[in-house]
Amino acid sequence: MLNLRGNKMRFLEWGITKNHWLWFHCLAGAFLSFAWLKGLWFLNEVGEQEAVRNVFLIALVWEIGEFLWKQFITKWDNPDYKKRFFVDALFDILGALLFAFSVTLFI
């Protein structure tokens, strides 16, 4: 029988409590969204939807690059490691989107 409570706790642990880079992704999402909304530096001023979309695309490309990089330097012997990586990546992308969206609400 599946231990759903244990799986949910492990999912949250991998995604939030032991995800040390999550907060960096959240701050980067908020900062990039703000930069696009205000047209800072080399970024053209865009609307709210475009800013959130751009943050999503950057986060997605970042996580794909991280996956490819880790495939070259890490052996995927442990199946839990691959699951943990995907949960970590999912929460990184969701965190960046959440903060990017919150910036569009309050700016």
Image (cartoon, rainbow, N blue to C red):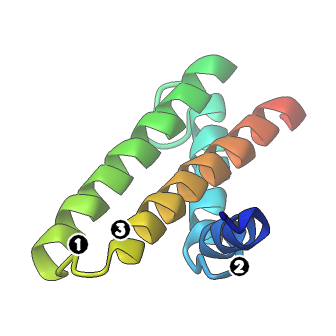
Q: Earlier in the sequence, mark 2 or mark 1?
A: 2
Mark pair 3, 2: CA separation: 18 Å
**Picture quadrant of residue 24:** bottom right
Query: Farthest right residue?
Result: 106
Residue at 73% x, 62% y is: 4
User: Nearest the camera: 49 or 61?
Assistant: 61
Q: Left or right of 6: which side holds 41?
A: left
Q: Which residue position holds label 1?
A: 70
Q: Which residue position holds label 3?
A: 82
Q: Quadrant of the C terminus?
A: top right
Picture coordinates of residue 45, whole percent (x, y): 56, 24
From what the image shows, is residue 39 above or below residue 77?
A: above
Q: Left or right of 44: which side holds 27?
A: right
Q: Which residue position holds label 2?
A: 17
* Three-letter residue code for mark 2: Thr
3 vs 1, front mark = 3
Can residue 18 be seen at all in this image of the molecule? yes
Indicate the secondary structure of the residue bearing disc 2: helix
Residue at 72% x, 44% y is: 98
Mark pair 2, 1: CA separation: 21 Å
Q: Left or right of 84: which side holds 4?
A: right
